[in-house]
Amino acid sequence: MSLLKINIVNLGKAKADVPEFLRMAPLIKLYGTLFLFFSLATSYGQESNYNISFEFYNHTYNLAVDSSIMITRSVELSEQHIKAYYKSVNQGKYNNIVDTLLVNKEKYLLNDWLYYQLVRKTAEQISPKKQNYERYTFYKWFLMVKSGYDARLTISDGRIIFYVFNDEDISDIPFLMFENKKFMCLNYHDYAHADLNKVPPLDMIGIPEAKKSFSYKVTRMPDFKPEPYQEKLLTFKYRQKTYHFNIKLNTAVENIFTNYPGVAFENYFNIPLSKETYSSIIPALKKNVSKMKQKKGIDYLMCFTRYAFLYEDDEANYGKEKRLSPEGTLFSEYSDCDDRAALFFYLVKEIYDLPVIALLYPTHITIAIQFEKPIGQPILYNGHIYSVCEPTPQAENLSIGQLASKYKHIPYQVVYAYEPKKGLLSTIK
């Protein structure tokens, strides 16, 4: 209003010989600016519905976004404002979006981690992350709580921090305890240089009816279209013969695990391969070991895991500890001991389905397998004898049953034990 008054006063002082249309020009410009401003605000907010469509893991999602769930202003970081935004959106027409997400979660058997990727994609379509990070995070939180998950927001040091209730053994990401429950941070990667562990847990914003815990287990990979897969050549030499594999890999799989935390070894070792990658490697390995005796076949898989990939420590490669899924190891140029242990376990399980344990040393992890007749230095666990099968290159050329000299007198911990289902016979004898 003050700008309008100033323009009117100025016009009143204008000389009489100035043409009428020129004297009115500043006022016309002002009204035009105000009209454009309010038109844009209206088109983004109260009177505008629109549809969003996006591809996600080989499926197209078409969602109608009603204007009643739109936040038309920047999200202000306070508990009072967040609760006001929730009240406003909660009164809007959001059910079709949440219902569609949950139906597809069940239809495509999405684990929680993959479902969260779908929620992220949906929130991005409603309110782009680059346009307004706080609003984008609010929508992620809203969709998660409306999906039943006990998700929380906190405000600290000018940041909106997103947590979810999780009762699993998770490492490498910030968490906090609140009301005797552990909440893992879902957006820690957006604050790479902040110590989120220092965030006070007193201002957590949640919804009482959202009580479900979130799981990081990935037990099924999405069915991707074959077209995006590209071939990668892997070679290794076994007993004077060179073997070649054209493995099909998809960058979308790598993207799934970009911000994936360190999960318990049981969950980590059992992350499956995607369908196309599985079909490009497992049948070929089965064929190559089909005429070998069991121990020679295991030795073959052990050497494949050792020598088909370049070794590099995670600290040197990523600047931090990062566990690659079996498919991630196939994809990556470099990998270390835990990556190879997970891949080797997966191969042994898929091809032979033998009892396996994982031995964790202070700076190393390796695998031991239970054979009908043990080989080499015995590893006793729960009344059974296992034989070490080292899947990571060592200074010594180790055979089945041999442990690297530097680990022989160091205590270890069995961090995972796999037992085949009763009555399930090995694929290859």
Image (tube, rainbow, N blue to C red):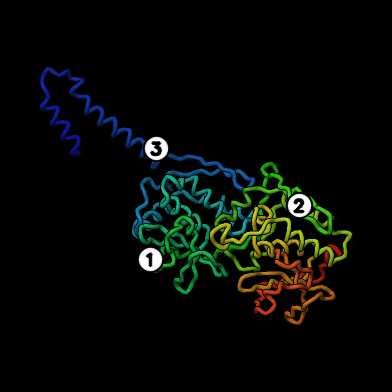
Report the quarter where the C terminus lies.
Answer: bottom right
Q: CA distance from mark 3 to mark 1?
A: 34 Å
**Nearer to the camera, 212 or 268:** 268
> Under tag 2, what secondary structure?
strand
User: Mark 3 and 2 residues: CB-CB less than 8 Å, in contact?
Assistant: no
Report the quarter where the N terminus lies.
Answer: top left
Q: Which residue is mark 1?
A: 203
Residue 105 lies left or right of residue 423; in this view the side is: left
**Residue 360: x %, y % from top left:** 65, 73
Residue 32 lies left or right of residue 213; in this view the side is: left
Q: Which residue is mark 2?
A: 235
Looking at the rendered image, the disc whose residue lies closer to the viewer, 3 or 1, is 1
Whether 88 is drawn above or below 54: the answer is below
> Under tag 3, what secondary structure?
helix
Q: Is residue 96 visible?
A: no
Residue farthest to the bottom? 383
Number of marks: 3
- Sequence-first tag of 3 and 2: 3
On the image, which quarter does residue 40 sit in? top left
Mark 3 nearby-residue class (10 Å; few <14, some 14–19, many ≥20): few
On the image, which quarter does residue 9 sit in? top left
- Sequence-first tag of 1 and 2: 1
The three-letter amino acid code for the residue at tag 1 is Asp
Q: CA distance from mark 3 to mark 2?
A: 58 Å
Whether 242 is drawn above or below 11: the answer is below
The three-letter amino acid code for the residue at tag 3 is Ser
Whether 271 is drawn above or below 24: the answer is below
Q: Which residue is mark 3?
A: 43
